[in-house]
Amino acid sequence: MSNADLKQDLQALGKRHLLMHFTHADAYGDKDLTVFDHGEGCWLVDQGGKRYFDGLAGLYCVQIGYSHGAEIGDAVRDQMVRLPFATNWGNGHEPAIRLSHKLATLAPEGMNRVFFTSSGSESNESAIKLVRQYHQARGEPQRRKFIARRVAYHGTSFGALALNGLTNYRKHFEPLMSGVRHVNNTKRYGRPVGETEAQFTQFLLDEIESLIIQEGSDTVAAIVVEPLQNAGGSLTPPAGYAQGLRELCDRHGVLLMTDEVICGFGRLGEYFGSRRYGFKPDILTFAKGIASGYVPLGGVIASDAVVNTVLEGPQQMFLHGATYGGHPVACAAALANLSIMEREGVLENVRENEGYFRSQLNALLELPCVGDVRGDGYHYSLELVSDKEARRWKADMSAQTFVSTVLAPALFDAGLLCRAGVDHEGTPILQFSPPLVMSRDEITWFVAQIRDIVADAYARATR
């Protein structure tokens, strides 16, 4: 079969049989489907030879870029030859044991127990069950309520979806797990002019405590936060917020759970975002970057106090399991990935370049449509507005039309893979979360491309 015939065959087969994730029906129409063929560094190449700079690291996960497949593949092959499969149901195997030990050395202090899954949604689902069983073991089964944040995304499975603060993701599948309440997230842009950071922090903490008291403090099981909230656009915590949450949890007997599915493994210049911002969680969830997306792997890291309470409780076990959780091949790939990250100084690269990345993006505030730049490490977002004084999009062209028909196509045509969307307030958001190996020269080039594309797109939308 010729290359042309192969491409056409894949087009037909893909549109006929592949149900793509969160993909509009238009993608199955007459327009060619983008079929990626190979990658190198921060770049992907499709079957037609077009190159794309991956400004989203796949989906916030390809920390080491696309050039280490052979090395991780060797680790996978060696493990396949030695032991292709084993469970963690009453048994152990070397890759899972060594990886759990490695994670305990990287996690916040006191977090020593690791339960493996295959994805972020599974990780959050597992953590929900661990929280519930912990309170049951303590003789407080009425603690079933969770507090999460508005606009936050925590996964697509039943319990994780209930934690989501994204209405459009939730509403089609309700009723979901009961007992989830949502509070304000940490978005500063749009808050009252003159409000200090300390005042904002106190507003957020007062709201949470008020909700705990209103619901009944003896009914609340856990507070769930991302250290840096992805949805809503790279929302960082204000000073004192992490410490305030810990104090609230301790005072009311509530567990603190940090969702590190995106923040973990170098995205913020630390192995975990909790370390960067000073969160002290009881339970931490992870996935994505642990194996740079090369294989599916996720998990939960919990404190000794939580796990020991469960193991000493009536059931004397964590009543949860998954066939592929801690798969030996996936764990071997993760160990190889972490070894590459250490050898190549990936976290150091983020730390050395994040200030430069931020300064380059801050220069875009000169554009008439860039209202806010926010984020840390290698995770940033631009909020685009047509009225900087009102901090809102008020152009004649709606935000959704602007993003879907002007901005997103322009980015894709230029070979830039970013996330362009409209937030819950009707404002365009442009998000960047590149591989952690992105160099300073690539930052310079990338931001220059973004400047030209955003300026031109806004001019087209408002002329």
Image (spheres, rainbow, N blue to C red):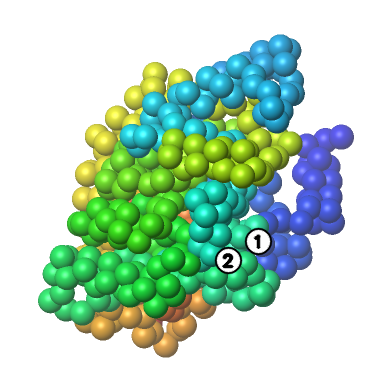
In the rendered view, does 178 fall on the left or right side of 187? right
In the rendered image of this protein, does residue 306 appear above or below residue 429?
above
Residue 377 percent location from the top left of the image: 31, 44
Residue 176, can we see it? yes
Specify the amino acid type for callout 1: Phe
In the rendered view, does 370 fall on the left or right side of 403? left
**256 or 418: which is nearer to us?**
256
Q: Residue furthest bottom?
A: 396
Residue 385 percent location from the top left of the image: 33, 75
**334 or 371: which is nearer to us?**
334
Quadrant in the picture for residue 26: bottom right
Residue 351 percent location from the top left of the image: 27, 36
Q: Which mark is residue 289?
A: none
Q: Quote the CA–CA distance across marks 2 and 1.
A: 6 Å
Residue beneath the point at 23% across and 43% down? 356
Asked if the residue at tag 1 contacts the one at tag 2, i.e. Cβ–Cβ closer than 8 Å, the answer is yes
Residue 357 percent location from the top left of the image: 27, 46
Mark 1: which secondary structure? Answer: helix
In the rendered view, does 232 fall on the left or right side of 366? right
Can you say which quadrant of the picture contains the C terminus?
Answer: bottom left
Residue beneath the point at 39% across and 78% down? 214
Residue beneath the point at 36% across and 80% down? 393
Query: Circle 1 is placed at which residue position?
Result: 158
Query: Circle 2 is placed at which residue position?
Result: 162
Q: Residues within 10 Å of mark 2 (few under 14, many from 20)?
A: many
**366 or 257: which is nearer to us?**
257
Q: How many marks?
A: 2
Quadrant in the picture for residue 187: bottom left
Specify the amino acid type for callout 2: Ala
Mark 2: which secondary structure? Answer: helix
